[in-house]
Image: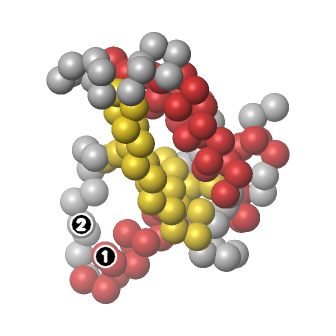
Amino acid sequence: MDPAEKVDPATRDVLLEFSMTPLDKGESVSAFVSRSLEIIDRSGLPYRLNPMGTVVEGTWEEALAVVTRCFERMRTDCGRISVSIKIDYRCGRSGRLEGKIASLERRLGRKLRTD
């Protein structure tokens, strides 16, 4: 069973942003990055893709498991990989993937460009 199916969504108190890029495959790496997006999508966790990486919301274990699966897949045919990870943990607070943006929009009194 996928870890995303075992956990109460209310306990997903980690936002993890990461980017993973092969360094030995030339300038165009979208084929490799798209494989990671398939893994992320299949995880069932809430996520947002942005031009510089992907933000995943989950428990500590769920979020790191997604990164591990992406890494394991990429290293099957990539000899050098750059990985950047940023983690925001807030105990007992879930739904922050949407909530952080909504909070800023309320404060500013307008919608922000997030697409």
Q: Which mark, residue 25? A: none
Within 10 Å of the Cα at label 2, are there few (<14), some (14-19), or many (20+) other Cα atoms?
Answer: few
Secondary element at image label 2: loop
Q: How many marks?
A: 2
Q: Which residue lies furthest to the top in this view?
A: 77
- Residue 105 badge: 1
Q: Which amino acid does label 1 sit on?
A: Glu
In this rendered view, identify the residue nearer to me: 28 or 5: 28
Give above or below for 28 relative to 16. Answer: above
Q: Residue at x 71, y 43 (%)?
A: 4
Residue in front for this viewpoint, 49 or 86: 86
Q: Residue at x 52, y 31 (%)?
A: 71
Q: Position of residue 55 (x, y in %)?
A: 44, 52
Q: Mark 2 points at which residue?
A: 112
User: In this view, which residue lies farthest toward the left?
Assistant: 27
- Amino acid bearing label 2: Leu
